[in-house]
Amino acid sequence: MACQMKKILLLLLVVLLLVLNLQHCVDGTQQVPCFFIFGDSLSDNGNNNNLVTMAKANYQPYGIDFPEGPTGRFTNGRNLVDIIAEHLGFNNSIPPFATARGQEILKGVNYASGAAGIREETGQQQGDRISLDRQLLNHQVTVSNIKNLLGNNESLATAYLNKCIYSVAIGSNDYLNNYFLPQFYPTSRIYNQKQYATVLVQQLSQQLLTLHKLGALKIALYGLGFLGHTPVGLTMCRNNSSCVDNIDNAVALFNDKVVTLVNNFNNNLTNAKFIYINTTEISLSSSSSEGSMVTNVPCCEVLTNPQPQAECIPFGTACGNRSQYSFWDAVHQTEVGYVVYGGRAYRAQSPADAYPNDIEHLAQS
């Protein structure tokens, strides 16, 4: 009897190991044929490297924890879309449009650009940047090249592009590098906060319709985070709580309108599936569990005078305990922050993380 019980237990153990191994294989499978990325420095992985701009990250100490060193990612290691690409099963990061060539575009392209915005003028005080409108023009080039690679078969190319995931994380610069810089931009004198959120989302709506016409059916939109609570926001406000709240309240108006936009598109665009990643909710619940994390100052050295800067000082020092810092520079998270953020965007830990569902479900749809 004891011998028979041992055989049964051994058989159960073998079955369990097979199931676990199968699960590992499933998780490691590329879930969609391609991943296209639009946005700003949250997602940029090298598109700004050769631009005449202050919005660059291709120097030390950026990339201090990245195997290739500084690449143009605005953090110490992997950025948000690197994490999401890994969850989606891609073996390598999605190449930037600046260097993407040949067959590799079939896996997707990253068009994101530091300082870019929904509005064309956003970020112009930093120098050149690739606005969302220009990113969409670049995507048109990619779509044309994909059609060529697929034998100039229009229906085959469209069917292929329909299956891909499209990430759109943009809008922060339309506030921090536009609306809340009245010395450079007139927008805060032209629009109150509610009006500005309306015109921003109206323009974003038209841009997303363009993306949809280019074959995008599975689109993840990211809400904006608590921009007032970033180190650059705190410096701009001189830690004045009412000023900080004013910035965050403006962002909340934008986020609410993006959720409405997601609902409208899902109800009115045939076969389209839009989701909203609730950045502020993820940030709130993550902060409450982080405990001793440093959240109000950056890990690397940044300039604060005469105008607060977001980027690290070239070849400046960086903190040694990077896993204890939420922010790498004055606005971008450390890799450890992106691991949490990207993980929850991919697979929601609570219903509030993503609406109506997360990226994992979007990939399976």
Image: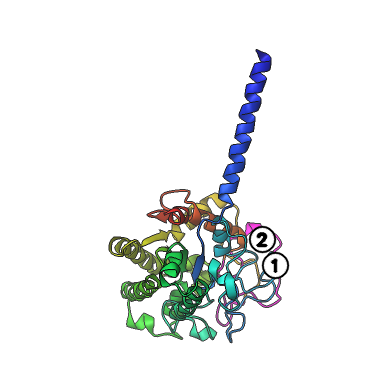
- The amino acid marked with disc number 1 is Ile
Q: Which residue is mark 2?
A: 322
Whichever of callouts 1 and 2 sits on the residue coming sooner in the sequence is: 1
Q: Pick out the residue farthest to the top.
A: 1
Asked whether 194 or 183 is in front, the reply is 194
Find numbered disc 1 in the image and state the secondary structure of the residue it sits on. Answer: loop
Q: Which residue is mark 1?
A: 64
The answer to whether residue 241 is seen in the rendering is no
Crowding around mark 1 (Cα neighbors within 10 Å: few <14, some 14 to 19, many 20+) is: some
Q: Position of residue 322 (x, y in %)?
A: 66, 60
Residue range in magenta is: 303-332
Residue drawn at x 48%, y 48% as measured from the top left: 349
Q: Position of residue 166 (x, y in %)?
A: 46, 66
| Relative horizontal placement of residue 201, taking residue 299 as reference (left or right) | left
> Is the residue 70 above or below the residue 282 in the image?
below
Q: Position of residue 133 (x, y in %)?
A: 43, 80
Q: Position of residue 185 (x, y in %)?
A: 42, 85
Report the Cα–Cα distance between label 1 and label 2: 10 Å
**Magenta-drawn stretch contains 164:** no
Asked whether 63 or 6 is in front, the reply is 6
Asked whether 296 or 264 is in front, the reply is 264
- The amino acid marked with disc number 2 is Arg
> Is the residue 324 above or below the residue 309 in the image?
above
Circles 1, 2 touching at the beta carbon (< 8 Å): yes
Identify the main secondary structure in magenta: loop
The answer to whether residue 230 is seen in the rendering is yes
